[in-house]
Image: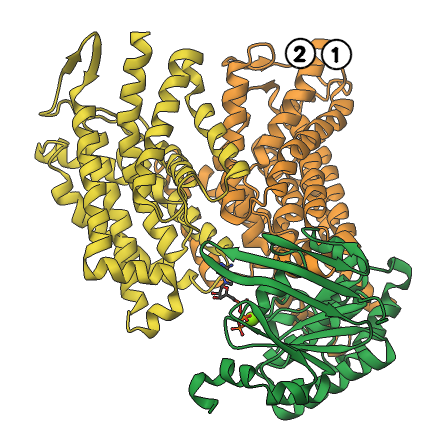
Chain colours: A orange, B yellow, C green
Amino acid sequence: MNTKQRTIKMLPLLVGLVVALIVPLIVGKNQYNMVLVTTVLFYGVLATAWNIIGGMAGQLDLAAWAYLGLGAFTSGTLLLRWNVTPWLGMILGGLVAAGFAALVGYPLFRFGVKEVWYALSSAALVEVLRVAFLMWDEVGGPVERYLPFHRASWYHMRFASYVPYYYIVLGLLLIALFVNYRISRSKLGYYLLALGESEDAAEVIGVDARACKLKALMIYAFIVGATGAVYACLFGFIHPSFFNTAQSTEVAILGIIGGMGIVYGPLLAAIILVSGREFMRANLGSSLESLYLAIYAVVLIVIALFRPQGIAPLFRKAYDWLLSRVVGERYAA
Amino acid sequence: MENIIQNLLNGALMGCIYALIALGLSIVFGVMNVVNFAHGEFVMLSMYFTFAAGAYWVLDAVTTPLITFPLLFLFGWLTYYLLIDRTLRYRYVTQIAVTVGLAILLRAIAQMIWQAQPRALPYSMIQGNIQIGGINILTSRLIAAAVSVVAIFLVYLFLMKTWPGRAIRAASDDLDAASLAGVNYRQTYALSFGLGTALTALAGGLLMTFQQVDPTMGLRFGLLSWCVLALAGLGSVPGLLISGVIVGGAEALAMSVWDPRSRLLAVYLIFILVLWLRPRGLFGRK
Amino acid sequence: MPPEPILQISGLTKRFGNLIAVNDVSVRLEPGTIVGLIGPNGAGKTTLFNAITGLHTPDAGRVLFKGTDITGMLSHKICKLGMSRTFQVVKAFSILTVEDTVRVGAYNRHGEKEIQAKVDEVIAFCELEDFRRQKCGDLSLALLRRVELARAVATEPELLLLDEAGAGLTGTELDGLMAILTRLNREKGVTLCVVEHVMKMVMGLCQRIVVLDAGEVIAEGTPAEISDNPKVIEAYLGKRAVR
Ligand SMILES: Nc1ncnc2c1ncn2[C@@H]1O[C@H](COP(=O)(O)OP(=O)(O)OP(=O)(O)O)[C@@H](O)[C@H]1O
Ligand SMILES: [Mg+2]
C-alpha cells in the first residue's frame, strides 16, 4: 500500500476528526444541541469499547452500565469523601471497574459460561449492582448524592457549559478508537476474532481463550469505568439508577448494528441511531412520548434482520464507490 | 417465624407462576434453540390484554385467558413467521438483537396505549384470604398457583402423549433427523413458538388477579424466567416447577429476613451461582 | 527396542451418559509416521480425537505426549507442546481472511516480527496464495478444509490429527491434499494421524492403520493386513459379507 492509498483510507477519519473538533464552534451556543452531540459521542465511546468484548471476542456483554456505574461511584465517592479530583478518579474508576470485571469474568470464563448465558448473567449483574448500591447506605442509597458544585472548576471537572465535557468525551472516544485499532492489529485482536468465531478451533491452534476473553473484558471495563467518572461529573450526582439494564442492552445493540468486530462500526451506529433517537425524542417528545422508541425498535429489527453483518460494510461500499468516481479505480481502497 | 413461613409459602405459590412463564420460554429455547429476549414483554402484553378485557368488557381476570390465550398464540405464530424464522440461519447474536428490538417495540406500544403508570383491575372473583393455623394466604395466589401447576401438567401431557407434542420434541432432539422423518420443521416451530407465547397469556391472566402491571414489568419477568430455566436446565418439565418454587421462595425469603429491596438480588445471585457451578441446571439432560 | 512413541494412549475411556463412545482404547504412535484411524460411523474416532486434544475430559485412561502426561490438559497448552488438529465439521473463522486465519495459528510460536514471514511460508506450503485475501466465510468446503490444515500447520506441530480432511473432496482436490500431507510428513517430519473414510487416501498414505469399532480397537496393522482382516470387513459390511 503506498502513501497515497493510505491517505485515502485515513481520509474519512481525518474529516470526521475535524468535524468533531469544530462542532462546538457551530452549535456551542445552543445548550440543547451540545447535550445532543455529547450524548452521541458518549454512546460512541461505550459502543466502541464494547466492540472489544462483544464485537471481537464475540461475548455478548450486556453490562456496560455496570462498569459505568462502578466508575461513576468510585470517582464520585472519592471526590465526596476525600476531595480526590475526578481526573484521577477516572483512572481509579477504570481500575475498579476492570478489577470487578476480572472478579466476575474469571469464574464465568473458567466455568465455560457462553453465549446466551453469558449475556443473561451480565444483564443480571447490572441489576445486582443496582440493588446492591441501593442497599449500601455508605456510598449509595436511594437519594442522589450531589457532587460538590463549583462554578467552572477544572479540579472538580465541573464546567458552566457542555463544551468542555464534549471535548473530554471526544478525547475518551479517540482513546477508545485507538485502543480498538491497536488491538485489532495485534495478536490479541486476531485471537479474539478467532475465538469469537469458534472457541474450540481457536484453542487447538494455541489460543488461550479464557485469558484472552478476560483481557478483553477488563480493557472494555476500564474504558467504560473511566467514562463513568466523566458521566458522574456531567450529571453532578451519583445514584444507583446509573446501573441501567435497558441502556446497557442498547450499547450492545449499537455494537451489533454497527458491525461486529469492525473498529469504526459501533461509532457509526451510535452517530446514526442515537442522534436519530434524540432528534425524534425532541421533536415527537411531548405529544407522542414513546413513538420514537417504537420507531427506533423497528429500525433495529429491520437492520438486524436484513443487515446481520451490520451497517459498517454498507458505508465501506459507499465510500469505495465514491472514491472510484472521484479519483478512479486505482486508488479505491 | 410464622411471618417467614407465610412469606415463604406465598413466594412458593408465586414460583408456580414463574414456572409457567418459564415453561413457554423453555419450549422456545429448548426446542428451537431460539433465544427470545422478549418473553418477559409477552407476559407484560398478556397482563395488559387482561387489563383491557377486564376494564372495557368487564371480564374477570380469571376468565380472560379464554380470549387472550388464542390471541397470544396467534401473535406468537405471526412473530415466528415474520421475525424468528428469518433469524434461524444467523448466529444467536442476531436473534438477540431482533428479540430485543421486539421487546423495546412492545414496551413502547404499551407505554403509548396505557401510559407509564401501573394499572390494576379493581376486583376479581377470587378474593380474600385463607387461614391455616396462624398463616395467611391470598386465595388468588393459591388458585393462580394451582392453575399454573395444572397447566404445566397439561402441557407436559401434550408434549408426551400427542402427535404435535411428539413432533415438537422430535424437532428438539435433532432438527435434521426430524425433518427427514417428515416433520415439517417450520410448522412445528411456529406451533412451538405460538404455544410458548400463549402460555404467557395464562400467566398474565393469573398475575392480574393480584398484581398491577406497568411497561417495565417485562424486563423483570424476562430475566426471572431465564433464571428459572437456568436453574432447571433444559428438558425437564417437573424440574421447571421445582426451580420456579425455589426462585419464588428465595425471593420471599430474601425479602422477609434480609431486606425488602433484596428480592431481585437473591434471585440473580442464585442465577449466577448456578451458571458457575451447574451450567446444565439442576435437572437438565443436555 | 522400538523408538519412544510420540503419543501413547492407554486405557482411554469416554462416556456420554450410558453410551460408551470410546472404550479402553490403547494406541501408540511412532514419531515420523502416518497412521490411519478408521472405523464405521459412530465408532468413536472423533470422540477419541476430542479426548486427546483436551476438548473432552476422558473418564478413564491416560494420554502421554512426548512423555508428558496431557490427560485433561487445556487444548491451547497441548498445542504449545506441539499437537494440533483439524475438525470433521469445519470450524472456520468466517469473518477472517485466509491469511489472518493462518496468522492466528502462526502466533503460536512466533512474535510480531517474524509473523508475516511464517504466514507467507505456510500459505505457500499449503498452496493457498490465490485465496489469501478472501474471507473464509466465502470459501468452498474443499478450501475451508485446506485452510483448516494450514492454520494447524502454522502452529508448527510435531503431531497433527486430521479428522476426515478428505471428506467431500473431488479426486483432484484429494490428490492435492495427499501431496501436501506427504510433504508435511517427509520435509517437516510431522507425525500424522488421519481419520478417514476415503480408502484411497488411507491406503495411499498410511504406513499403519488402527481400526475402531463401537469404541474399541478391533484391529491394527499395515494397510495390506487390514484389508484382509475378516473382523474389519465384518465391522464395515456386517456379518453376512464374511463367509
Ligand atoms: N457430545 C456428545 N454427546 C453425546 N453423544 C455423543 C457426543 N459426541 C459423540 N457422541 C456419540 O458418540 C458416538 C461416537 O461418535 P463419534 O463422533 O466419535 O464417531 P465417529 O467415529 O467420529 O463417527 P463418524 O465417522 O460419523 O464421524 C456416537 O454414537 C455419537 O452419537
Ligand atoms: Mg467423526
Side of B178 where A42 appears, left or right: right
Q: Nearer the viewer, residue A265 or A210?
A: A210
Q: Label 1 sits on what residue type?
A: Asn
The residue labelled by disc 2 is: A148
Task: Judge whether B248 appears above or below A136 on screen.
Answer: below
Asked if the residue under mark 2 is in contact with the one under mark 1, i.e. CB atoms within 8 Å, the reply is yes
> Where is residue A45 drawn, in percent x and y?
66, 41
Identity of the residue drawn at 58% across and 54% down = A258
Q: Is any part of residue C140 visible from this angle?
A: no
Identity of the residue drawn at 24% across and 39% down = B46
Task: Judge whether C32 appears above or below A120 on screen.
Answer: below
> Where is residue B21 drawn, in percent x and y?
30, 39
Q: Label 2 sits on what residue type?
A: Pro
Chain at tag 1 = A
Task: Judge whether B173 appears above or below A234 on screen.
Answer: below
Side of B167 where A178 appears, left or right: right
Q: Quarter of the image holding residue C39?
A: bottom right
Q: Quarter of the image holding residue A221?
A: top right
Q: Quarter of the image holding residue C61?
A: bottom right
Is label 1 within 8 A of ligand 1 (CB to nearest ligand atom)? no
